[in-house]
Image (cartoon, helix red, strand yellow):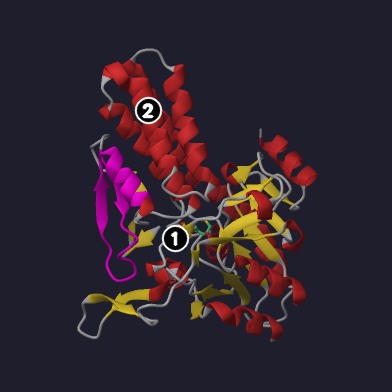
């Protein structure tokens, strides 16, 4: 991704240092662009749980390097037990994104398969690198498949830009690079397609306002920020041509867990005959689950995120304000489940399929 004309990834090794991982601290965006170095297992766990990094793919890549750090820190005599403990700690940081446990298991398998502690540490590093590079390449390919959908919808428009609505941030900042929901948008921009993005603010943490708006601006994509409840109104008035969102976990039959509010956008899109797409890497599928509503664990976060808002004060300082009565009790559900029947197509690195078990299985077999 471009930041002030310079290429960055949301996570990368510190140049020249294999043992230090550098992230963009997303808790300061869009106000300040700060890079933070992660070294210890505690650094990695904190970065994920406090949402310095967030988004399914980036959480996975960060956790993979957390496992490498744990392998380096572990005393030889308790190596296996310490690695198992680190895996459990990392998996507990955020429960909803399937990519987290997937990435941890990729590194765990590499450790288990290598002989000798030094080889295990090296194997862990190589597996984490593969998770990171794989994530970037996967997103790039999702962009190319999604581009064809955007091209077809744009060709049907008599005039004006193709209006795309997105929720939360499934962008460069949520993955290693390119994003998932945003990858087709960036590919379409590069192909010269006239488009415009409606950006849901995405309460309570405002990933749309703070992150998606920031990265679309940095890439020069025309967009407007809207309140979370505006989507239905825009759809009723013909101002949305398609919706594209990311995913944190997708079941065997195609039910999608994504940021809270996604389900309401899918309902409104369905009611207005607007195509609703979900873009995801295959590592987001969880084939151990079928009925998303019954089975996907939904993270409930600190109500403080709901009762307070962080922003830049007139003084120029960053500050936090209370927006409800001090004593009001609040429940902060982080995600919801959109049933497969409301989804037009899933866009993965191997192609496009229906949100339906056979179509998903066929696509995955094609990629295997
Ligand atoms: O709580 P977050 O910011 O980690 O939420 C996850 C997400 O980024 C969204 O749900 C996103 O739309 C899909 S994951 C890239």
Residue 99 as seen in the image, left or right of residue 14: right
| Foreground residue among 41 and 333 | 333
On the image, the x and y values in percent for residue 337 come to 64, 59
On the image, the x and y values in percent for residue 311 come to 31, 76
The magenta stretch spans which residues?
20-48
Residue at 58% across, 82% down = 230
Find out if the beta carbon at label 1 lies less than 8 Å from the nearest ligand 1 atom: yes
| Foreground residue among 261 and 36 | 261
- Give the number of the mark in front: 2 or 1: 1
Residue 33 magenta-drawn? yes
Quickly name the residue at label 1: 301
Residue 30 as seen in the image, left or right of residue 152: left
Judging from the image, what secondary structure is the residue with disc 1 in?
A: strand
Identify the image quadrant of the N terminus.
bottom left
Q: Which mark sits nearer the N-terminus, 2 or 1? A: 2
Quickly name the residue at label 2: 83
């Amino acid at each position: 991704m471009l930041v002030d004309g310079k290429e960055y990834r949301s996570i990368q090794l510190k140049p020249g240092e294999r043992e230090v991982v550098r992230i963009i601290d997303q808790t300061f965006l869009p106000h300040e662009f700060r890079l933070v170095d992660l070294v210890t297992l505690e650094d990695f766990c904190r970065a994920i749980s406090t949402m310095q990094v967030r988004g399914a793919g980036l959480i996975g890549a960060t956790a993979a390097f957390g496992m490498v750090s744990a392998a380096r820190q572990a005393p030889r005599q308790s190596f296996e037990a310490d690695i198992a403990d680190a895996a459990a700690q990392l998996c507990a940081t955020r429960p909803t994104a399937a990519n987290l446990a997937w990435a941890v298991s990729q590194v765990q398998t590499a450790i288990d398969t290598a002989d000798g502690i030094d080889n295990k540490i090296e194997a862990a590093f190589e597996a984490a690198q593969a998770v990171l590079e794989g994530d970037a390449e996967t997103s790039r390919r999702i962009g190319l498949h999604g581009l064809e959908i955007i091209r077809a919808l744009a060709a049907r428009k008599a005039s004006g830009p193709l209006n795309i609505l997105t929720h939360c941030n499934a962008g460069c900042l949520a993955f290693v690079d390119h994003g998932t929901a945003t990858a087709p948008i960036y590919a379409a921009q590069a192909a010269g397609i006239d488009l415009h993005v409606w950006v849901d603010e995405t309460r309570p943490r405002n990933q749309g306002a703070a992150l998606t708006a920031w990265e679309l601006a940095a890439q020069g994509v025309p967009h407007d920020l809207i309140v979370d409840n505006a989507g239905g109104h825009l759809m009723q008035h013909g101002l949305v041509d398609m919706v594209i969102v990311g995913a944190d976990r997708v079941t065997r039959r195609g039910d999608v867990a994504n940021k809270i509010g996604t389900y309401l956008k899918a309902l409104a899109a369905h009611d207005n005959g607007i195509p609703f797409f979900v873009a995801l890497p295959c590592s987001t599928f969880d084939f151990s689950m079928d009925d998303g509503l019954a089975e996907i664990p939904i993270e409930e976060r600190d109500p403080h995120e709901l009762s307070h808002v962080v922003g830049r004060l007139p003084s120029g300082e960053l500050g936090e304000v209370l927006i409800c009565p001090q004593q009001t009790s609040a429940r902060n559900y982080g995600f919801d489940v959109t049933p497969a029947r409301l989804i037009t197509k899933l866009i993965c690195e191997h192609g496009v399929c229906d949100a339906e078990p056979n179509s998903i299985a066929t696509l995955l077999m094609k990629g295997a």
